[in-house]
Image: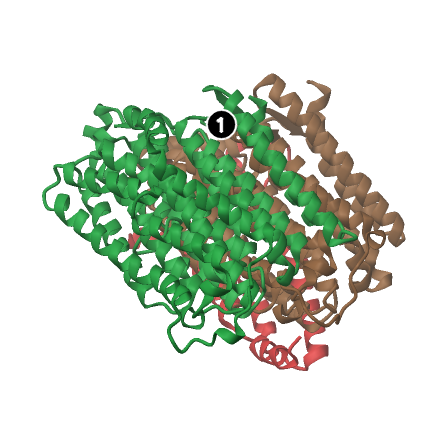
Chain colours: A green, B red, C brown
Amino acid sequence: MYYIILSILFPIFTGVYLLVRKEMKSRKNLLMAAGIFFVISAVLVILALCMAGNGLFTLFNLTNRLPILFKIDEVSVVFSVMAVVVIVCAGFFSFAYMKHEGKEKRYYGYYLIVLGVLIALCFAGNLITFYMFFEVLTLSSMPLVLHNGSKEAVMAGLKYLFYSLSGAYMSLFGIYFLERYGNTLTFSPGGVISAEMAVQHGGILLGICFAMLIGFGVKAGMFPMHAWLPAAHPVAPAPASAVLSAVIVKAGVLALVRVVYYIFGVSFLKGSWVQYAWIVLTLTTVFMGSMLAYREPVLKKRLAYSTVSQLSYILFGLSVMNAESVTGGLLHVLSHGFIKGALFLCAGAIIYMTGKTRVDQLRGIGKEMPLLMWCYTIVSLGLIGIPPTGGFISKWYLAQGALLSDIPGFNWIGPVILLISALLTAGYLLPLTIRGFFPGADYDYGTLKKKEPPLIMTVPILILTALSVGIGLFPQIVTNYLSHIVERVI
Amino acid sequence: MGANLFSNYGEAVAMILFGIGFGNLLLQSNLIKKIIGLNIMDTAIYLFLAEKGYIADRVAPIVTNGVQSMEAYINPIPSGLVLTGIVVSVSVSALMLSITIRLYQRYHTLDLDEISIRLKKEGL
Amino acid sequence: MNFVQNFPAVSILLCLFAGIISSGLKKKAARFVNTVLISIVGFLSLCTLIYVMGTGESFVYVMGMFPAPWGNEIRAGVLEAFTALFFCIIMLLSLAGGRKKLADEVEEGKTFLYYVLMDLLLASLLALVYTNDLFTAYVFVEINTIAACGLIMIRQNGRTIEAAARYMIMSLLGSGLLLMGLCMLYDLTGHLLMSNIKEQIKWVYVSGQYRIPLLVTIALLSVGLAIKSALFPFHAWLPDAYGYSTVSSAAILSSLVSKGYIFLLIKIIYRVVGFEIFYESRIVDVLFVFGLMGMIFGSISAIRENDVRRMIAFSSVAQIGYIYMGIGMGTQAGMEASIFHIFSHAATKSLLFIGAIGLTDVSGGSRQFIELTGSAYRNKWAGVTFTVGSLSMVGVPLFSGFISKLLFAQAAVQNDVKMLPALIILGISTILNAIYFMKTVIRIYTPVEERKYESITFKDMKLYVATLACFIILNVVLGVSSQPIADIIGQGLAMFS
């Protein structure tokens, strides 16, 4: 039991400690401390996952009816494992990368706090606990966006803040109503809305559900509240962008999983206007994100737009609400997390070694850093959905789910849009590979220098790449696990 | 309605005076006129109270020739309230006047709006 | 009669005596008397609170030997005792936090007067909280006004005197209306004691007579007190008064003085007019609408403000709007939320004022945002405190502001008609709050390249830092363990009727 609380509080307290203590004597000490904190946090999370069991852990009562409580279930496991892996990898990557960004103590402080808050989100057992840490996540991740302090970063940070707060308030609005009309805010598979309530207050509950979808969808970059994401993610330092894009946005996805499958329940929502509206929104986002990414010349921004699009793949899977699609969505949570983490770290490594940010400047990059570009290419293929990577499996499930669903119209529009978007994904990711490895006849090989990044940067990228391929090679391990979740919620 | 108003003309006058005082206190920009408005307003309330306490054909409850029946006297409590009220309003007026003097010494004007404009110019 | 039952009356008298004694003392002695006084009064209130919670019912203390319909009474229940205790805590902390600044801003020879005024202010606040007699309430309302006016203009510059004048004028308008309302109430019922008036009003109301005079009376009382507590649109005096007076004054004015009037209004609603009769008049809707408008316009003015102190002052306008919105909701839950917000806002606003002064002090005394850049690095404790206050105001969980908003929203969803406007305005206002508070927080944490101002060290301001720590603890306690306080409020309201 206490491992839960320890695994949440340890990163938060060590983060605060790093923030408040004096500047360390040397950079080495700081990195050592941060590294040790990362490892201990990861170990604690694993301990919590193994030891805590299925019980509820009530921390204290905010008011009589609103306890702050934690519970570990399969969804927590999926999200927390993904979060910890990406955060620790990106954390070690930062050891080299953050040298040229400066203000490292502050960076690692907030980084650890974000880790703790994310774990808390994964373990949250009811909506009010979730909401509380959701707000804290926004506030504690904002310094990562603001890190370099430029005007652009501040504007992006403010944009992030206001979008997130508005979204969070919309969700809070829903929580108020749920507290009135629902009998509990505790997550339980299959939802807490009883049949009687669904009849009595059906209309208002659907309205609330939609408000909460939009509100929490802000964090997941869902249309119409997606504009903050392409602004905020690229201005952060690259490892922080990796965390923002791969993990923190997943908090929004987790929120939607919790709200839809653990509060409202499939039986209540399936076939309602909310479901259709949600599908439309996700498909719009999928398409629009890919289009915008395709037109974007700056690599990191391109990846951010890609996040917008890929997240809505997940949300599309969730919105179709059948076993295959939900499996696909949750699988894509994992594979997108690893892939997008790796992609941003690659972009970071390129910036760190060459200082170039635009795609068209990167001709011949594959000749300069072949290993890095191989990783980039493999994970890109994964994101497009080409076997044998994890992306293929998840998209397979998504498409199958859409086809099997009995929603008229969407059962063929959905797969078509997914396919078009996959083509666009290839269109915006692969040019870098192609130009990188085949710079053309006029490329001046004389100036070519090997610029492979240091080991501490390459290893995290390699780990993430390996994981994303691993999901593709042995999908049944993951899908078997996910089937436990799916069985209980559908 | 009309008959009621006429028989309670004292209260009606008090209300009109209250309105005049209130308006002056709110709308005048001259501080002294504001204070006069304040006094009119307060006095109107005392008039209202006195009217309420007075019962026709009775005398003030001052015992001179033994206690008569309760029916002979007016209600003394409003008079007590009026006295207390006067004390309060005197102190408040004094405070207002002292503030006015301070402002006049600084800005040589009694016009509150003009003082505000000057303060803005000072940029304090 | 239990010995503890003397405590409310004793604490009021103690304050008055302390004021008189202090007027003959030197600065340090007056300060000492004041600190001891507030502590003693706080302790007495605590005893009263424990006693009342033990017996489970309120008690009436007869002043002098005159029994009910004629004499003057004091009445103490759970809510009264808790409010008194809370006011003492806030006052003590605000004075401690602003002590250093006071020495700079007030003439050396006049500092003792500041403490005299503070004693009298406490006396009047306690009287407002405890009294069971309406005319006594009026008298202490005036004493409160005079003391508050003195607190504004004890720092001598043109702005404060003008602010004091404006404050006086608005207050006098308010108390004029209040007094008129009281007289009409006396006219209608023939009583001045709250409990007796309530019986009579119930009787008058059931008999169906005097409906219009009753309505006018309720309107006069509510509007009078609303003006005095700076409900929008009667807030014109507020930014100057809070913005330019010395910092302890600003903290105490915004968190205690205006709250004293609101507390009196709530008492009038429950103990004089009666909850049901009050809500059957349409006055609640008026209060509700003005509350909502205050929430929006106060925040908008705050966003446009370039001066941090005035910004916090405008935020007070918005917060008072919240309180009136809760009162106007017309439900028990709304009232409980309002009372909780009285406490939570008192704790947060004084914290913000005291925190802001630490930031302006390390920015060359300038309160303009541009100068405040990076001030949180120069005074870390003030920076953290200000951030905590801002988060609380925005309504981030774990701080007191979140609980208030939660309670308001819970109250709102119980009222079908007012639910939608209340929730929407609550949402807009939250986002507006976030805009100006987060803007400030980002500003104070934006590093500056050249070192224009000195940073401050812990040694210079032990007392200040201790105060800030207490404020933060208070805020978090309100935010985390709100249930006992909500219980006290519920119990207290039950004792009212």
Work out which residue is located at the far left of the displayed protein and give it: A408
Dividing the picture into quadrants, the one containing residue A359 is bottom left
Q: Secondary structure at mark 1?
A: strand
Q: Is residue C46 left or right of residue A355?
A: right
Which quadrant of the figure contains the C terminus of chain A? Answer: top left
Residue C58 is situated, as x and y percent measured from the top left of the image, at: 58, 24
Q: Position of residue C196 (x, y in %)?
A: 50, 31
To which residue does mark 1 refer? A69
Name the residue nearer the viewer: C3 or A145.
A145
Is residue A354 left or right of A220 when viewed as pictured? right
Tell me the residue at 76%/43% (across/down): C16
Quarter assignment of residue A228: bottom left
Q: How many marks?
A: 1
Of residues C134 and A202, the one nearer the viewer is A202
Q: Is residue B81 visible?
A: no
Report if residue A23 is visible in the image. Answer: yes
Which residue is at a point 49% across and 27% down the rendered structure image?
A69
Chain ID of residue with mark 1: A
The residue depicted at 71 percent of the width and 23 percent of the height is: C4
Pinpoint residue A481: horizontal percent, then vertical percent. 36, 27
Q: Which class describes the residues within 10 Å of circle 1: few (<14), some (14-19), or many (20+)? A: many
Residue occupying the point 50% across, 40% down: A85
Position of residue A58 relative to residue C290, above or below, is above
Q: Position of residue B103 (x, y in %)?
A: 68, 74
Q: Nearer the viewer, residue C405 or C204?
A: C405
- Left or right, A355 with respect to A406, comes to right
Quadrant hosting residue A1: top right
Viewer-nearest residue: C489 or C196: C489
Which amino acid, mark 1?
A: Leu
Vertical position of residue C328 compared to residue B89: above or below:
above
